[in-house]
Amino acid sequence: MTKQLYHCSFEIHGHVQGVHFRRCTERKSKELGLRGWVMNTEQGTVKGEIQGNAEQLQQMKRWLQINGSPRSRIDKASFSDLRKISKFHFDNFTIRKHPPINLTNMNSS
């Protein structure tokens, strides 16, 4: 039986640029079998989207909140609610230089 797929957007605040945060995020996402993307923002944060089953997403969210890259300092991690999807919207997990045209709007709470 196929597990339900979900989508989640995230934004990480703190010392997360110039410390291999995106590369480590890509590595961890691929290790967990997630698809999506990650990128630096002009505001000094890291944003991205992840897709996978609920267990995979929970593991990744925890990693983004607590671990990150060895030299990073995570001050705040914001996540959208999990949204059910019927299929993956990404072929793999990538590091992006520019936001996609339909960048998900993050509503931090």
Image (tube, helix red, strand yellow):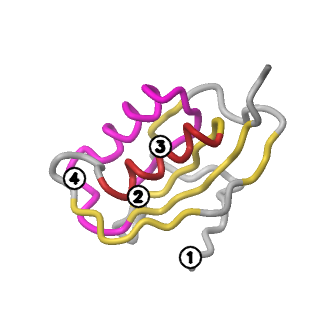
Q: Which residue is mark 4?
A: 18
- The quarter of the picture where residue 103 lies is bottom right
Residue contact at pointers 4 and 1, CB within 8 angstroms: no
Please tell me which of labels 1 and 3 falls first in the chain: 3
User: Which region shows up in magenta?
Assistant: 13-40
**Mark 4, other Cα within 10 Å: few <14 / some 14–19 / many ≥20:** few
Residue, disc 1:
108
Tell me which numbered mark, 4 or 3, is placed earlier along the sequence: 4
Question: Could you tell which of marks 2 and 1 lies nearer the N-terminus?
Answer: 2
Residue type (three-letter) at the residue carrying disc 3:
Gln
Q: CA distance from mark 3 to mark 2?
A: 18 Å
Q: CA distance from mark 4 to mark 3?
A: 24 Å
Rendered position, 2 above or below 62: above
Quarter of the N terminus within the rendering: top right
Evaluate if marks 4 and 3 touch, with contact meaning CB atoms under 8 Å apart. Answer: no
Q: Quadrant of residue 20?
A: top left
Please, what is the three-letter code of the amino acid marked with disc 2? Answer: Val
Residue at mark 3 = 59
Say which amino acid is labelled 1: Ser
Measure how far apart labels 2 and 1 are at the Cα level: 14 Å
Query: Would you name the residue on which mark 2 appears?
Result: 46
Amino acid bearing label 4: Gly
* Pointer 3 or 2: first along the chain: 2
Which mark is on residue 84? none
Task: Find residue 66 and report its horizontal and vertical position in percent.
Answer: 31, 56
Gap in angstroms between the C-alphas marked 1 and 3: 20 Å
